[in-house]
Image (cartoon, rainbow, N blue to C red):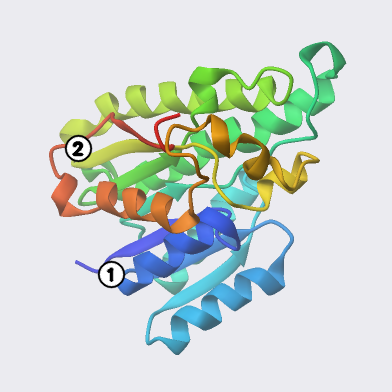
């Protein structure tokens, strides 16, 4: 069976690292991006230069019609997905809860929670034998913040990732008998651009001494955990979350 993977938000950071590693392991890769077409096309170019198959498609995972279109385009270009990585996520500037408005919270939940649910729905509609599929694997990107709470910074983001943990457990049990495994990876403090989005580009440097391993993590270290969960080596693992957080 052809291995076809969709990685949402795959143009930068952890998503790009997952895309590169998946291609090296023989997957035909689709990455979705929101606005940064150049970065997405650079990832695709890198994969194809190394003999892999990759495409990039624009989609806002917070918009149901975009997600439906995204999966239909993957169907037409590569075939039915056999693996989904719900990587697209966002956060807003660091703030206390008493400084947040409803619009901000809605934006975070729309991308991080709604988007992951709808992408998972579309993947199951292609993987499940109920819909003519032959199984597959889904990995959701959670965060250590789901259990630590991110006080004074991103409680809304942390809450969205706690919802991802529940989605992972519930969906895993729902589709286990249909040959679909659903797991999650919970990164800790990783060197990516997301910290700049929150208003503190040097956040990893500030926090690394509080991490038991005394360093931030790399996107590649997260990607390796994701690809293990997608692989046959994890064939009896579902509903699990792997922390990639240096002991944090």
Residue under label 2, please give it.
178
x then y, percent, for residue 16: 52, 63
Residue at 50%, 36% in the rendered image: 188
User: In the picture shown, does residue 186 fall above or below 45?
Assistant: above
Residue under label 1, please give it.
25
User: In the picture shown, does residue 54 fall above or below 244?
Assistant: below
Q: Is residue 100 left or right of residue 165?
A: right
x then y, percent, for residue 174: 28, 26
Residue at 46%, 88% in the rendered image: 49
Mark 1–mark 2 Cα distance, whole angstroms, equals 24 Å
The total of numbered circles placed on residues is: 2
SS at mark 1 in the image: loop
Q: Residue 102: which quarter of the image?
A: top right
x then y, percent, for residue 217: 48, 48
SS at mark 2 in the image: helix
Residue at 62%, 76% in the rendered image: 41
Q: Is residue 132 visible?
A: no
Q: Is residue 146 visible?
A: yes
| Residues at marks 1 and 2 touching, judged by CB atoms closer than 8 Å | no
Q: Residues within 10 Å of mark 2 (few under 14, many from 20)?
A: some
Q: Residue 178: which quarter of the image?
A: top left
x then y, percent, for residue 183: 32, 36
Mark in front: 1 vs 2:
1
The N terminus appears in which quarter of the rendering?
Answer: bottom left
Residue 159 versus residue 224: which sits nearer the camera? 224
């Amino acid at each position: 069976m052809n291995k076809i993977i969709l990685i949402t938000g795959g143009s930068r950071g952890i998503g790009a690292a997952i895309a590169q590693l998946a291609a090296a392991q023989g997957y035909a890769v689709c990455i979705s991006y929101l606005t940064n077409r150049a970065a997405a096309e650079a990832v695709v170019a890198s994969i194809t230069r190394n003999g892999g198959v990759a495409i990039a498609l624009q989609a806002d995972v917070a918009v149901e019609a975009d997600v439906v279109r995204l999966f239909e385009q993957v169907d037409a270009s590569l075939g039915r997905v056999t693996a989904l990585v719900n990587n697209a996520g966002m956060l807003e500037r660091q703030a206390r809860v008493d400084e947040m408005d409803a619009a901000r919270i809605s934006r975070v939940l729309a991308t991080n929670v709604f988007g992951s649910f709808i992408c998972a729905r579309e993947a199951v509609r292609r993987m499940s034998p109920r819909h003519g599929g032959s199984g597959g694997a889904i990995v959701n990107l959670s965060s250590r913040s789901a259990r630590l709470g991110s006080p004074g910074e991103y409680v809304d983001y942390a809450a969205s990732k706690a919802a991802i943990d529940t989605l992972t457990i519930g969906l895993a049990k729902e589709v286990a008998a249909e040959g679909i495994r659903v797991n999650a990876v919970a990164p800790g403090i990783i060197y990516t651009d997301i910290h700049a989005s929150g208003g503190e580009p040097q956040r990893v440097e500030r926090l690394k001494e509080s991490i038991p391993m005394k360093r931030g993590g790399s996107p590649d270290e997260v990607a390796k955990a994701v690809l293990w969960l997608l692989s046959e080596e994890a064939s009896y693992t579902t509903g699990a979350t792997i922390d990639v957080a240096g002991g944090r």
